[in-house]
């Protein structure tokens, strides 16, 4: 088993971190860089460009194209750094005490760097089973970029055997994660001078009724926790996350926006929970608003949606993941990934396993331990050896 030198992984990660790929910016310069790097080993990929032409996923196959292979999946986007107190430039890799600091080091350019650093070994191994690299964009805002790529994968004549999604799990095999459905509710009230407040329709106060109902239902979900669950939070969760409305102290607010989400354990539970809340609000709140004025009401819009992941513990992809990781345990996590979309959109069984810990993701001075990157390198090396047989 041959793993890359730590300095090679470090160099690749430094290059990737230097690209500012916050989701409101293009990732094409980073994709260009990856394509040039792959070309130096005679490898090419297939771009799947978005409608704006400013972002692209990349599907790469190393090995025979007429056989079913295994996928290593990672995203190129990172969360914003604005408002965070970093001790150094977040887009410059800094090494300190066995850790590599920079935006995206854990989530999840560290995994992508390891996979790219192992490309020479993949090329030299004479793979009998192909290895695919699935490199996507805008995962942080709802797994956006992987979906068009998966539609292309689903059309291929040969379907992959399985997928390893490299989100940070400290190289533990994750067989399940919660789904998520996010909803935006825009309350349309009627503005009036606050001295004649009864003549207006207070959008914020009606929004408060929705928030109270969300909180009530969240408590019911918490009371229905699973026994002996593999999840750290063993029940579906419901949360009001954003509220804004009103213009001035002396004006009855004519608008209030509320954003809320459910993270559900069941495959479609998150949407079922939010759909029930929307139906309740339309039946209980909106008629009261319209009785005050016919133009008042609530507009609902979906923000994001992805299903839960629930891969069987005895599935072949789980067995392989444990073999490559050199461990026999598995777990489930509350955060979501594109793994569930590989399963639901392309019928590709998936697990989540990657370097670093979720506690470091999205934080100022985000870091990944070098030892974690090396463990990930060992995982990919065992994958290569398996695919070369």
Image: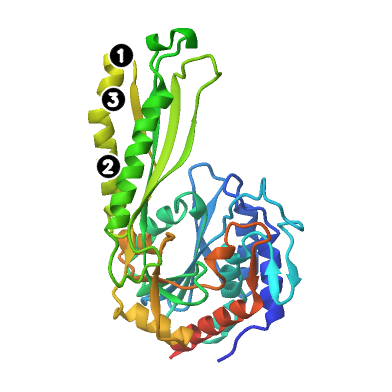
Q: Quadrant of residue 130?
A: bottom left
Question: On the image, numbered disc 1 is attached to which residue?
Answer: 292
User: Mark 2 packing: few (<14 Cα in 10 Å), some, or many (20+)?
Assistant: some
> Residue at the location (42% across, 87% down)?
323
Q: Quadrant of the C terminus?
A: bottom left
User: Mark 1 packing: few (<14 Cα in 10 Å), some, or many (20+)?
Assistant: some
Q: Quadrant of the N terminus?
A: bottom right
Q: Can residue 129 be seen from the camera position used here?
A: yes
| Left or right: where 218 falls relative to 338 | left
| Sequence-first disc among 1 and 3 | 3
Q: In whole angstroms, how far apart are the C-alphas of marks 2 and 3?
A: 15 Å
Relative to 296, residue 301 above or below: below
Q: Nearer the viewer, residue 46 or 105?
A: 105
Question: On the image, numbered disc 3 is attached to which residue?
Answer: 286
User: Residue 115: image x %, image y %?
Assistant: 56, 74
Foreground mark, 2 or 1, reads 1
Relative to 326, residue 348 above or below: above
Q: In whole angstroms, how far apart are the C-alphas of marks 1 and 3?
A: 10 Å
Q: Quadrant of residue 156?
A: bottom left
Task: Give the secondary structure at mark 3.
Answer: helix
Q: Can residue 304 be seen from the camera position used here?
A: no
Question: On the image, numbered disc 2 is attached to which residue?
Answer: 275
User: Residue 69: image x %, image y %?
Assistant: 40, 76
| Sequence-first disc among 2 and 3 | 2
> Residue at the location (41% across, 83% down)?
322
Foreground mark, 2 or 3, reads 3
């Amino acid at each position: 088993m041959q793993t890359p030198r730590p300095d090679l992984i470090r160099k690749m990660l430094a290059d990737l971190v230097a690209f500012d790929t916050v989701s409101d910016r293009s990732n094409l310069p980073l994709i260009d860089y990856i394509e040039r790097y792959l070309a130096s080993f005679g490898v090419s990929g297939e771009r799947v460009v978005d409608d704006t032409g400013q972002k692209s996923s990349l599907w790469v196959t190393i090995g025979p194209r007429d056989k079913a292979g295994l996928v290593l999946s990672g995203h190129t986007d990172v969360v914003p750094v604005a408002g965070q107190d970093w001790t150094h430039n977040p887009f410059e890799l800094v090494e300190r005490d066995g850790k590599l600091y920079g935006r995206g080091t854990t989530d999840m350019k560290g995994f992508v760097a390891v996979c790219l650093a192992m490309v020479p070994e993949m090329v030299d191994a004479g793979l009998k089973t192909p290895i695919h690299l699935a490199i996507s964009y805008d995962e942080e805002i709802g797994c956006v970029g992987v979906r068009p790529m998966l539609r292309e994968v689903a059309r291929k004549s040969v379907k992959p055997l399985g997928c390893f999604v490299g989100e940070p799990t400290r190289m533990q095999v994750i067989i399940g994660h919660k789904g998520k459905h996010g909803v935006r509710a825009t309350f349309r009230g009627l503005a009036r001078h606050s001295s004649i407040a009864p003549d207006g329709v207070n959008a914020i106060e009606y929004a408060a009724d929705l928030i109270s109902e969300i909180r009530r239902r969240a408590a019911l979900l918490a009371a229905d926790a699973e026994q002996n669950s593999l999840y750290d939070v063993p029940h579906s969760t419901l949360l009001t996350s954003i509220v804004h409305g009103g213009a001035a102290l002396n004006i009855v607010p004519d608008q209030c926006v509320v954003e809320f989400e459910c993270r559900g354990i069941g495959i479609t539970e998150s949407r079922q929970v939010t759909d029930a809340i929307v139906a309740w609000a339309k039946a209980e709140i909106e008629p009261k608003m319209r009785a005050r004025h016919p133009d008042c009401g609530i507009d609902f819009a979906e923000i994001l949606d992805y299903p839960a992941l629930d891969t069987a513990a005895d599935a072949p992809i789980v067995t392989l993941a444990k073999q490559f990781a050199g461990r026999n345990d598995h777990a489930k996590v509350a955060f979501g990934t594109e793994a569930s979309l590989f399963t639901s959109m392309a019928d590709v069984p998936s697990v989540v396993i990657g370097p670093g810990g979720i506690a470091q993701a999205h934080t100022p001075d985000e870091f990944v331990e070098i030892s974690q990157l090396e463990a990930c390198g060992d995982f990919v090396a065992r994958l290569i050896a398996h695919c070369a047989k």
